[in-house]
Structures are given as structure tokens and as C-alpha cells.
Image: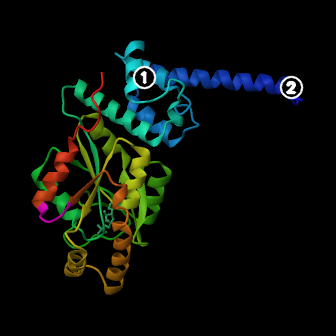
Amino acid sequence: MAEKRPTPPDVDRVAASRAAVAARRARAAVKSEIAQGKRSALEVLAAANESPDGIEGRLRVTEFLVSIPAIGVTKMHRIMEKLEISLSKRLGGLGKHQLARLGDFLTLRTTSRRGESAARLVVLAGPTAVGKGTVAAHIRQYYPDVHLSVSATTRAPRPGETEGVSYYFVDDAEFDRMVSAGELLEWATVHNAYRYGTPRGPVDDALRRGHSVLLEIDIQGARAVRRAMPEARLVFLLPPTWDELVRRLIGRDTESAAEQTRRLETAKLELAAQGEFDFRVVNHDVAEAAREVVDLLNLRKAPSLP
Ligand code: 5GP
């Protein structure tokens, strides 16, 4: 015989229904912020991804879509079908691929409605000494339309590096402050030594203005960006060969022998992660690799949708 569930005491029921009403109101507020353009749909999606049980995460995808100006019920149904998302899904309950498809759809929609080519967030990662920095510097010089993110780091400047261009060089206390204030899109301790992080504000601003953004960061950072911004394209820069990678690292001569050994160990682990990336670019030639990366910044990979 089925067990009878105990009825909760009246006070609990009242509290629960009050909480439900408050949550519904908060979700309605999010929808009207999207409808009025006070918050972008992409921001709401990122918030849902970060906290699936939060207000944004509990929002139904159907309601989320119809709150976007110019998407009515009929269009919403077409979008849900194309994105292969069932009608009962909430933003926080989407699978990885569904999130990526929805993110792609929203990014493309935002930029193409402004008549611009689609702005992209591209992450360039790869093993140590593969030449990410050189490729990024080439892009900075020859492709001024690309917004190159400037990271914060706790390591000291090397000769020739400039504050605010190469990095924002900060001390541990300032880095701690940035982390706790939520100012970093991602951060990681690299080579078990110093901390590096991507300031969130400039990335968001550039994307909102329709500019493509390039992040040159390590692999842990790339994984964190994928979690925070599923629409990002992850590019893995490969050396032509392992021997070439060793030669480049030793040839650079900026690190001590112990540091070089540590970086080579990290590089082996990093190479093993290449399968997690959307694209692989081999760095035979800096200008050629840079061009391939820049091409990916405007790549229209998402399916065409209404
Ligand atoms: P370096 O000290 O040689 O400039 O950089 C060391 C490593 O830190 C490189 O692999 C570089 O890609 C990575 N890095 C630079 N900025 C960031 C960042 O903002 N976040 C993360 N996760 N890694 C970064």
C-alpha cells in the first residue's frame, strides 16, 4: 500500500508558497529586463549557466525566448525545434550542446541584426612556448579590428613588456581583490607559479559593441571560458613537432633550467588536451597561423535559424 505523505505544517506551506511567488516575480523581472533591452539574452544565459538553480537558471527556455524582442510564439517554436530543445526545459537544465547551440544562435542574432558580421569570442590556447604570444602579437599589429584581451598577472614584467599592453601587472592582494569582486571571467595558476586572469568588463563591452575578441590564455582558462561562455570558439595552437616545441622553449632563454623543465612537463599534459578544442591550428609560420585564427573570429558555424 502506498505510504501516505505527511502534510507539511501550515506555516511551512505558507513560507513555501511565498518563496514560490517571490521566485516567479524575480523571473518575471528578468524577462522584462530582456524585453526592455536592459539585459542581453546572452548575459542571462551566461548567468543561468553559472548558477543553474538561480533565478535565470530556473527560467523556462520558451519564456526566455519570447521575452526577446521580435521573437513571438510561432518563431519560438521553430527555434526550439531547430535547436533540439524540448519545450519543458529550463535554462539551467540545458545540456552542453544545447547551451552551445542556444549561445551561437543568440550571438549570431545579436550581431547579424545590427548588419555586422558575427562577433566571436575566440580562445587561443596551446602548450607552453608554442608561440601563442607571437601569434597574438602579430594579430594585434596587423588586425586592429580584433579586440585582444589584456590579462592580469601576478608575475613580474619581462624586459620589453609594457603595463596595460602585455599584461596588467598586479600584486597578490590586488589579484585576490579582482577574484572576489567577480572581475575576472576566468583565472588560473599557470605552471604552478603565478596567477593569470582575464578581466571580464572589456570582453563583455567589446562583444556588446559587436567586436570579435581574442583571449590568449592557458588550457585551464580555456575550459573555464567554455563553462562561462559556451558560444566561445576554442582554438588549439600546435607546434609542427614536439622537437620543435623543445627547441623553441630552450631557444627562448628567458626561463631558468628548472623553470624550463617544469614548463616542458606542463606542455606534455597540455598537448593531451587538444581533443577538447573546436579547432587546431599548426604554427608552421606566424603570419599564416595568425590568419587562420583571425578567420575563425568571424566563422559562422551555427545553423541558419529564423
Ligand atoms: P607568460 O608568463 O609566458 O606570459 O604566460 C604563461 C602562460 O599564461 C601562457 O600559457 C599564457 O597563455 C597564460 N595566460 C596568459 N594570460 C592568461 C589569462 O588571463 N588566463 C589564463 N588562464 N592563462 C593566461
**Residue contact between numbered discs 2 and 1, judged by CB atoms under 8 Å:** no
Q: Name the residue: 45% across, 32% down.
A: 44
Q: Which residues are magenta?
A: 282-286
Query: How far is disc 2 from disc 1 in space, using C-alphas?
Result: 37 Å
* Image position of 121 (left or right of 181): left
Choose the circle earlier in sequence order: 2 or 1. Answer: 2
> Are there few (<14), some (14-19), or many (20+) residues within 10 Å of tag 1?
many
**In magenta segment, residue 284:** yes
On screen, residue 133 above or below 302: below
Residue sitting nearer the eye, 105 or 9: 105
Q: Name the residue: 39% across, 30% down.
A: 83
> Residue 131 location in percent, x, y?
21, 66
Locate ligand 1 by image quadrant: bottom left
Kindly state the secondary structure of the residue where label 1 is placed.
helix
* Image position of 4 (left or right of 46): right
On screen, residue 296 above or below 78: below
> Residue 260 location in percent, x, y?
32, 81
Instruction: Please give the residue where the numbered disc 1 appears in the rendered image.
Output: 65
Q: Name the residue: 53% across, 29% down.
A: 89
Q: Which mark is residue 7?
A: 2
User: Where the N terminus falls, by quadrant?
Assistant: top right
Residue sitting nearer the eye, 274 or 14: 274
Kindly state the secondary structure of the residue where label 2 is placed.
loop
Identity, as a three-letter code, of the amino acid under mark 1: Leu
Q: Main secondary structure of the magenta part?
A: loop
On screen, residue 73 above or below 1: above
> Are there few (<14), some (14-19), or many (20+) residues within 10 Å of tag 2?
few
Q: Is mark 2 within 8 Å of ligand 1?
A: no
Identity, as a three-letter code, of the amino acid under mark 2: Thr
